[in-house]
Image: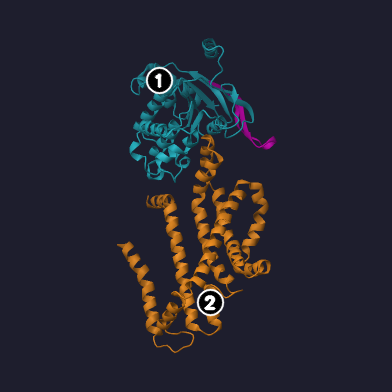
Chain colours: A orange, B cyan
Amino acid sequence: MRKTLYLVLGIGTPVILILAWFAVSAGSTDTFFPPLSYILERFQALWLFAHFQSDILVSLLNLVIGFALASVIGVGLGFVLAMLPKVGEYLDPVIHFFRSIPPVALVPIFVALIGFGVEMRVTSIAMAAVFPTLIATVDGLRGVDSTLKDVSAVYRLSTREKVLGVYLPAAGPHIASGMQVSLQTAFVVMIASEMLGPAQGIGAMTLLAQQSFMIADMWSGILLLGVIGFAANMIFELGRRRLLAWYIGSRQLAKAS
Amino acid sequence: MSHEAATTAKRPAALPRLDVKSLAKSYGTGSKAKVIIEDLTFTVETGEVVCIVGPSGVGKTTLLKCLAGLQTATSGSAAIDGRVIDGPPREMALVFQDYNRSLMPWLTVRKNLLLPLRHLKLPAAELRERCDSALEAVGLTHAEHQYPWQLSGGMQQRVAIARALAYRPEILVMDEPFASVDAQTRFDLEDLCLKIRDDFNMTILVVTHDIDEAVYLSDRVVVLGSKPARVLKTIDLDLPRPRDQITTRSLPGFAQQRTEVLSLIKRPA
């Protein structure tokens, strides 16, 4: 009963908000707040599918590659740092220094180092998004129960079995939370990286529209970014629920009892 | 004294299966050193069930960690067939006290049993047989596809025991294995313990603080005193085999030996 209520509210609220936006903005002559109907018209004209391949796909590809790199490097490096405590201690201050820099501020550095190309965008995304995953992985691995480590030792599991069969799943919930933050960071930096260099990508198109006073186009870009961000998070959440079903299940059970 | 003589006479050439010699363990050094185990000496022969009893917090778990090669003794040694233990021995399985932390929560019961077997490279049929029989032995066949956290504490402990059984160790070491199960299950598991000893000629070492359990299970009881841990006395038990929960426990000898152990533990240090 309660669940249905939340579901109705969850779906209903955005629908009501959009309808309200549509109704209130209808017939608007304000330059900065054009009617939603017009924004949707522009949305269709721009993104479905004129700029799909040239911009949407390019942005998404940067996001996916950057995020994938960040995840692999974050988890891999996290393992190294957690398994070699001496190295971890040594590098700890450096990592915390770099992760304290706002991710977007890293973009100019990479422009200077790599130039304006796709490589710069992917590198910026990956470098900014690596820290949440890295730090969560180290934390997760340091928190692996000592009893599980003892069990692995007593039953003489191979290093490979320990890493992939015990440590990785045991740190899984932590790693997933870190990756979720990484995904958000990657998304922000994806847009930020497009504000410099060639005008290609959703962020670049949106900025260009704003600068050339095509306000409806700008709104349509923002709308698209919202949809993509929402979808990306939803896909991630579905994957997380599948992989960590054991964790979610055990937590629910612990809460219920 | 008489016991040592008897053992030597029976098996003159053989080394003891498990030989703990002047084992000591302390943390820290110098004046700050905290001595957990002062000086432990005892042996366990093949096919024997030996219980270690002593008050809580005496350092029994530390002792087991030394035997399992998880910690190194500060001085003295523990050896299997004369081979000093310096890492987890391949012929040993250990059932941990913290049953709820020793199982992998992301694996089903059956997969928990399979995890330690993977690197043994056994044929699929044998893997299946080992899991099936271990689960049947602890009465958890019906729960094989459930996750540990879906089971009660007692059931989780039985999964941990089944995991050790499926591993088919030659030496089984258990740290207060039956502390969290109900009385009926406890009796069943105690009898299971004696049965696998008979079936596989397994050597079993059990840490417990339950004196009745120690007397019922053991061929020998090592009574530890605290603090630091030291052997107060090693008592040979000669209750007839096979043992039975009702008849063995009502023997006059049972009560007598129970009293002997109890008086050692109760005695002010």
Q: Chain of mark 1?
A: B
- The image quarter in which residue A122 lies: bottom right
Q: Specify whether disc 1 shares its chain with disc 2.
A: no
B37 in the magenta segment: yes
Please name the amino acid that badge 2 sits on.
Answer: Met
Name the quadrant of the N terminus of chain A: bottom left
Please name the amino acid that badge 1 sits on.
Answer: Ala
Residue A39, percent from left and from top: 44, 81
Residue B255 tag number: 1
A211 in the magenta segment: no
- The image quarter in which residue A204 lies: bottom right
In the image, what residue occupies the spot 40% across and 45% down? B149
Residue A78, percent from left and from top: 59, 52
Q: Which residue position holds label 2?
A: A205
Figure check: B65 above or below B196:
below
- Under circle 2, the secondary element is helix
Q: Does the rendering let one see residue B97?
A: no
The region drawn magenta spans B21-43
Q: Are the residues flagged by discs 1 and 2 in contact, CB closer than 8 Å? A: no
